[in-house]
Image (spheres, rainbow, N blue to C red):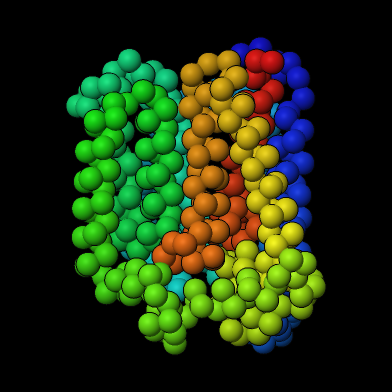
Amino acid sequence: MAKARRAPDFLIVFCTLAILCIGIIMVYSSSAVISLSKFGDQFFYVKRQLLFAGIGVVAMYMMMNIDYWVWRKFAKLGLIVCFILLILVLTPLGLVRNGSQSWLGIGAFSIQPSEFIKICMIIFLAKYLSENQKQIVSFTKGMLPPLLLVFAAFGMIMLQPDLGTGTVMVGTSIVMIFLAGARILHLSGLAALGIAGFTALVIAAPYRIKRITSFLDPWQDPQGAGYQIIQSLYAIGPGGLLGLGLGMSRQKFYYLPEPQTDFIFAILAEELGFIGGVTVLLLFSILLWRGIKIAISAPDLYGSFLAAGIVSMIAIQVIINVGVVTGLFPVTGITLPFLSYGGSSLTLMLVAMGILLNISRYART
C-alpha cells in the first residue's frame, strides 16, 4: 500500500490521551489509601500505571506508523500464539489472582493472554470476513468456521474463569459478523443458543447466580453478593453535580473493593460528580463516532472490518463497565478502557488505537 497520505485522526488522538490522563489521575486518587496500606507507598499503583501508559503510548505511536495491512499477514500466527498462551495459563505456569487463573509471568511482571486474544481475534476476523464476505450468508460455509474459533477461545477463557473478557470477545466477534452481512435468522438462532449457554454457565456456578440475584436486588445480600454494587451506588450518589472534589472520595477508604480497577468510574463520579462522569462519556462518544467514520471510509473491506472490530470492542467494554458501576448490569469484572488500572488491558487498548489511527491515515475523505 502507498505511503500514508495524511495525518492521523486528531480527535481520536486527543480523546484517547485525554481519557488516559484522566485515568492516571483517578488511579492515583482511588488507590493511594490502599497502596499506602498494602505496600507502604501511596504511589505504587499509579507508578505502574504510568509505566504501562508510557509503553502503551509508544506502542500506539508505532502502530500508527505501521501499515495496517502488515497485521493481515500475521493474523493466523497471532491467533495460534494466543491459543498457546491460553493453554499455558491453565497449567501450573498460570498465576491466580482474585479467584481467576488468567495471568502468565514471573514476580511483578505478568501478562493476561485473554486480553491479547481480543485484538488478535479482531485481526483474524477482519481478514476472514474481507476474504469470505460473499459466503457469510451461508451458515456452514461462512459463519460456522469463525464461530468455532470464537467459541473455542471463549471456552478456554471460561476455564480460567473470566466471563467478562470472554463476553467482550464474543460480543465484538458477533458485531463484526453481523456487519459482514450475516443473516438475521442465523444470528437469532445463535442468540438463542447463547442465552441457553449463558443460563447453563450461571446455573453451573453458584457465585454467578449470586451475581445475578444481587444485580436484581443488591440489598438482599448487602454484606455479600450485593456489596460491590451497593458501595458503588453509595459513591455515585453523594457526588451530585460537581462531586466531592478530587481526592475527597470516601468509598476508597476500604468500602469499595479494588476501586482502581473495575469500579474506577464510581470513584470518578464521587469526586468529579455528574459533570465529570458526563465529560468522560462524551470523550468516549467522540472517540467512537470518529472510529465509526473511519470504518465507513476505510479504503478496503479489511480496513473497514478491522476498524469496526476495534470500535465495537471499546464500545462494549464502556457500556458494560458503566452499566455494572451504575447497577444496570451484573458484576462482570470488565475494565473501563484507558481509565482502569491494568497493564495488559491498557497496553493492548493503546495498541488497538494505534492500528485504528493508521487506518485513519488511509481513510477516504
Q: Is residue 287 left or right of residue 138?
A: right
Residue 36, compared with residue 105, is above or below; it is below
In the displayed image of the protein, which residue is found farthest to the front?
A: 241
Horizontal and vertical percent for residue 339? 65, 58
Instruction: State which quadrant residue 222 falls in.
Output: bottom left
Residue 184 seen = yes
Write the residue at 32% across / 26% down. Answer: 182
* Quadrant position of the C terminus in the picture: top right
Residue 196, compared with residue 230, is above or below; it is above
Horizontal and vertical percent for residue 2? 66, 12
Horizontal and vertical percent for residue 338? 65, 53
Write the residue at 53% across / 38% down. Answer: 310
Q: Is residue 149 left or right of residue 305?
A: left
Tag count: 0
* Quadrant position of the N terminus in the picture: top right
In the displayed image of the protein, which residue is found farthest to the top?
A: 2
Residue 24 seen = no
In the displayed image of the protein, which residue is found farthest to the right?
A: 245
Write the residue at 43% across / 54% down. Answer: 165
Residue 153, compared with residue 146, is above or below; it is below
Write the residue at 56% across / 22% down. Answer: 296
Horizontal and vertical percent for residue 73? 48, 25
Q: Is residue 185 left or right of residue 301?
A: left
Instruction: State which quadrant residue 35 falls in.
Output: bottom right
Task: Compare residues 80 and 183 and report the one nearer the observer.
Answer: 183
